[in-house]
Image (cartoon, helix red, strand yellow):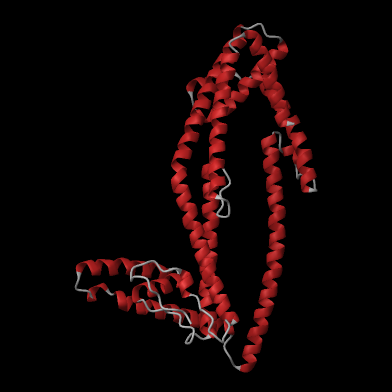
Amino acid sequence: MISPPEAPQDAAVSLSALMVQPGDQAPLTPAQQRFNALLARIEQLSGQIERLQAWSDRHRYAHIQALRESVQLAQAHRKSLLLFVHERLQTADFTERQQRMARGLVRGLIDQLAASADPQVQALADLYVSDEDTQEAAQEQAEAAQRLRERIEEALGQPIENPSQYQTPEEMMQAGMRQWQRQQEADEQRKAAKRAAKKAHKQAQKKSAAAEKGEAPPAVLREADAKSAIRTVFRQLASALHPDREPDEQERLRKTALMSEVNAAYEKNELSTLLRLQMQVTQVNPQNATRMADAQLIAMASLLKEQVAALEDDLDQLQSRLSQELCVPVGADVDEAAMTQALQRIQADQRHSADSLAADLRRIQNEAELKRWLKEQWQLAKATSA
């Protein structure tokens, strides 16, 4: 049996307190074990969401602010590099090859600064779109795209569809990702179709057997039992918390707030929340093992299963959103210290990037160093696209 709670009336009640406990001589039935497992999973998922949100609240603002400042500083240095290299193209004694390298670097800097909509950057963008430069850049992009295509096709195990349509590494990568996603979706659809067919076959067999016996299908009975159970708990809570029956103003406000929680949980079919509130409000355990039949537990388990699915979806969305916003992998199963260190590393990387651009700007004030730097940047660009 489940022991009655000893906590104060308004204290938070753990879902573990709602679990069915084995008797002295009676072990838990499969239905009771399933009911307990679902409550445990709901408590685990709720805790993961709360902890992940709390961790995000502690670090998110400062992290995003630090990244924004580093990015802004890096963009300012890129603009200075762009203006300096452009000016040197007009005055320095460059060979034809060095001029090509400098123009390529200028175009790369313009691409990195394009989102800024800076008038000086836009003016240089218009200046560096000559037919010769455009053709030169297009050829380089096409060669890089071809090299990337070979690697993608090796990974996919099949050729890229219509590869001639993609003339840049970015386009080729996007095409490869789309093709990979189509492969994954096709595989998942085949698996889902098999699962659905198998499930439909089983349901048809159960309905046929029930029809022969003149009985309602078990699923229909469980759904009716589940709806009845959640309505019963809701009505009990509504009766206990009815604010109009409370003469004390403070108590009426407290009951109004609790009733808002009850209404929200009822609308979402969150049975575990209603059970927890029932124990919290009445201090009477709503799940007495001596009175709760397996059929009722099975019916309630269907509602708890829906709540588990909703919480799993909420957790997935939270992890995805935070990973995108913070630019690091974020997960409920990842150690918080490790995630915090990942934030610190990416902040350090962004600061290092800005510092490196500043160092480059100081270095190329010397013409000999400028030419060496152009060659290094050219080689680095080719190695990156290879």
Image-based side of 245 in relation to 106, left or right: left
Q: Where residue 85 appears, x then y in whole percent?
A: 59, 15
Image-based side of 123 in relation to 252, left or right: right
Extreme residue toward the front, this view? 24
Q: Where residue 1 appears, x then y in whole percent?
A: 48, 82
The front one of 80 and 336 is 336
The vertical placement of 273 against 331, above or below, is: below
At 65% from the left edge and 80% from the top edge, which residue is drawn?
Answer: 203
The vertical placement of 147 against 49, above or below, is: above
Q: Where residue 43 appears, x then y in whole percent?
A: 50, 65
At 58% from the left edge and 84% from the top edge, which residue is drawn?
Answer: 218
Image quarter of the C terminus = top right
Image-based side of 258 in relation to 94, left or right: left
Q: Quadrant of residue 358?
A: top right
Extreme residue toward the bottom, this view? 213
At 46% from the left edge and 43% from the top edge, which residue is drawn?
Answer: 60
Can you see residue 270?
no
The vertical placement of 245 against 381, above or below, is: below
Can you see residue 248?
yes
Image-based side of 231 in relation to 112, left or right: left
The front one of 264 and 147 is 264
